Amino acid sequence: MLRPDLAAIAEMIEPNTRVLDVGCGDGALLEHLKQTRGVDGRGIELSQQNVNQCVARGLPVLQGDADTDLADYPSQAFDVAILSQTIQATRAPAKVLENLLRIGRHTIVSFPNFGHWRVRLSLLAKGRMPRTHALDYAWYDTPNIHLCTIRDFMQMATQAGATIEKALALGANGTKLIQADAFGPNLMAEGAIFLMNRRGGGAWGPIAGRAGSS
Amino acid sequence: MAQTANPTFLRPVSEPEADPGKAITFSAPLALDCGRTLSPFTIAYMTYGTLNAARSNAILICHALTGDQFAASRHPLTGKPGWWDIMVGPGKPIDTNRFFVICTNVIGGCMGSTGPASINPATGKSYGLDFPVVTIRDMVRAQAALIDALGIEKLLSVTGGSMGGMQVLQWAASYPERVANAMPIATAARHSAQNIAFHEVGRQAIMADPDWKGGAYDAAQPGKGLAVARMAAHITYLSEAALQRKFGRELQDRDQISFGFGQDFQVESYLHHQGMTFVDRFDANSYLYITRAMDYFDLAGDYGGVLADAFRNTKARFCLISFTSDWLFPTPENKRIAHALNATAANVSFVEIESDKGHDAFLLDEPEMLGTVRGFMNAAATASGIR
């Protein structure tokens, strides 16, 4: 079974396209895309064990790092560049997003939402760095060094010149479409998936200038 | 026209039971990068497994500097197991129950393929330094002639480590339509200044040996020089950590240092042994020629300095492997190849394997490497419809 957030990403991908999965793990998404959509997929993955598993599955995967290795990819070489549940662990998220938007005609980024009410409540009530089901690390040993909220991410995407085509809220009960002008998801969603591009097509709605406070 | 016979070796066969393989002699001249031609020329080779009816299951294995065609079977001169016995054989990662494996001795070598010790038809004597300087591309051209003669249009895979990896890269560049899957291991697309420097030390050791005689030695080859060359080179194949772990400062057959220049230390004794056994199976002039071929290798140089252009026409799936402690062909050199392949949007995998065994790790029992190769070859077979 594909993880629900990966299944939601897979739904966004057209058949027979070229896809780069950055932080592809054991290749579950790439394998699924290859089998069900005839996708020509490539991956980048940090862990040697995971890369070996991918190679053994016949998936082309490079051992590498989103922070350092994306710069070597040619522009617009892929139909879709995916970064799932990884951006919060990169050293320079803005630069990584910039590269993804350059490499892919479309870019999909998913991440845990630090604006979720459980996170907020945990900090408010306990006065300690929040630990939740989705982000279960002590502050001193977490790989998640650049956590953000949905609104934070949208701001960074705007600054990178991205047009948001579609956004999904991730929760225990599956995914839900995020409306362009909705405030709720930043409080209620455990995570989010954004489909973007930098060519200006298929705009999902204005994302700049919102003054919501949720 | 080509004729197949038993190979001729420079040294006597010590293992009459071992399969000597075959040698194929081509009368058509081999055009070389230096502008000269080699005619006739002979390629000595071994095969393992069976070529299927569709001729689609052939894997070419390319050997390193001092390797030979005996990748997976007992060596007829030394009696030792094949140099890649751990990798190639029935049920092994390169499974000879499924694949037809070919391994050739490179041109310029000394195990039956035409090299500086072969007879020059113009003089009736060994070529010596009259042998033309060959390149990695020449080695690959000669291999392609053999693959043609075997009636194989497309290789399921070409693989090899070190200089073998250079040949793999050259195959992908020179014959992009003939390679379905390429696996270069612990290699580089160009020989580095440091590596050229080490090779020059080895060559000078050979040429400084009075027995070398300007390359025109007969039976007694410059063994001392060749042994020193091997000793120096062998250090580069290991890592500091591996040497320390294996030998440390342990003394050899003595309780205290001798205040002399004998082999006080175990590491000295080990190197001497490496040098001596090497002389028994290798030819000094071949060592000069093959190290030169590696020095001259600069794949990007043939393509206007743009490595990616070397791979422009390739449709092959690539899998690159490097080792953390390899300082002869370090990870960045291997990654440079991956980046060039990425730039052409080629299908490429890259794995860096944690090992303290240095460059030689590719010849050793490294489970992660074996697993990667097995996975890649299985996927290659599946993609090509081979059971």
Image (cartoon, coloured by chain):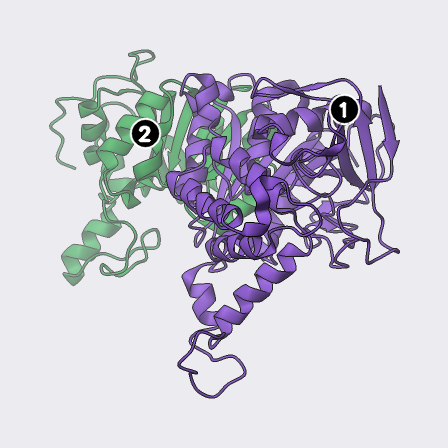
Residue at horizontal 34%, vertical 41%? A86
- Quarter holding the C terminus of chain B? top right
Image location (x, y in percent) of residue A115: 22, 43
Residue at horizontal 22%, vertical 19%? A161
- Quarter holding the N terminus of chain B? top right
Vertical comparison of A200 with B342: above or below? above
Vertical comparison of B255 with B143: above or below? below
Image location (x, y in percent) of residue A147: 23, 45
- Contact flag, marks 2 and 1 (Cβ < 8 Å): no
* Amino acid found under the numbered disc labelled 2: Ala
Residue at horizontal 44%, vertical 29%? A20
Q: Which chain is rendered green in the image?
A: A
| Chain designation of label 1 | B
Q: Which of marks 2 and 1 is in front?
A: 1
Image location (x, y in percent) of residue A123: 17, 56
Q: Is mark 1 on a helix, strand or loop?
A: loop
Please identify which colour was used for chain B in the image: purple
Nearer the observer, B177 or B81: B81
Q: Is mark 2 on a helix, strand or loop?
A: helix
Image location (x, y in percent) of residue B255: 47, 88
Q: Residue A71 carries which label?
A: 2
| Chain designation of label 2 | A
User: Label 1: few (<14), some or many (≥20) within 10 Å?
Assistant: some
Would you say residue A84 is visible in this rendering?
A: yes
Q: Which mark is residue B40?
A: 1
Nearer the observer, A156 or B299: B299
Nearer the observer, B133 or A175: B133
